[in-house]
Image: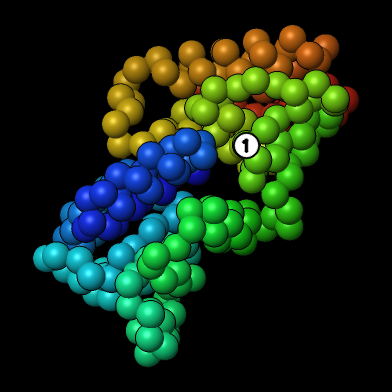
Amino acid sequence: MRLLVVEDDDDLRLALVEGLRMSHYAVDETADGEEALYLLTTEAYDLVLLDLNLPKIDGFSVLKQIRESNADLKILILSAKSNALDKVEGLDLGANDYLTKPFDFIELEARIRNLLRRQFIQEKNILKFRNITLNISEGTVAIGDEALQLTKKEFAILRYFLLNRDKIISQEELLEHVWDSRANQFSSSIRVHIASLRKKLQHYVDYEVIGTKVGVGYYLVKEGGIGDV
């Protein structure tokens, strides 16, 4: 999942970015509202963490402009403004949730998971496909009773596949939702990571997990060896 952190406090922003990347999210960052709006017109995000007290364009204005063009993007306000009127205004303008500073990172992670579950209509933090089990909150993957050791990027790719198990996923879509803006869209990074993930999965199973539709993208191979979605 790809997130945008909009926070003008440098120390807090960098801590959030580092922590979220450790939790297998692709993360872009900015310190002002003007750049945030630019990024939102040029990149695709699954969720935005939005401070209210921003330079150039304040958070309320950013939120309002987002909602004028995108009703579905998940937005979590992070603000030192704790009074009820500010919370009501933020929610009325279209924020999905509101977290008051200071906050515990584990609570932030839980709220992010909750918002993304709504987006993908998931009821639990555990995703299953055939005998593969992925625990979103714990960052673990198991095949049967065997723990699978994945890199952060491999975990993020597999999670995205499990959340979109009934569709073919193009390389462009993976770039938009699993990589951040630092990625080179012309590199072979996606193919390399997919190949590595396949190799690790094949060590434990005797069936194909990730299939390829030439010229289109990748998909999860369903029970019975069905070669398409």
Position of residue 154 measured from the top left corner of the image (x, y, whole percent) = 56, 25
Image point (38%, 59%), residue name? 49
Position of residue 153 measured from the top left corner of the image (x, y, whole percent) = 50, 27
Vertical order, 106 against 213 (above or below): below
Residue under label 1: 139
Residue at the extreme right: 224
Image point (38%, 67%), residue name? 101
What SS does tag 1 mark?
Answer: loop
Can residue 212 be seen here? The reply is: no
Image point (58%, 56%), residue name? 110
Viewer-proximal residue among 44 and 152: 152
Q: Is residue 207 left or right of residue 28?
A: right
Q: Is residue 189 left or right of residue 184?
A: right
Res 107 quadrant in image: bottom right
Q: Quadrant of the C terminus?
A: top right
Position of residue 187 measured from the top left corner of the image (x, y, whole percent) = 34, 17
| Amino acid type at mark 1 | Gly
Res 202 quadrant in image: top right
Position of residue 143 measured from the top left corner of the image (x, y, whole percent) = 79, 24
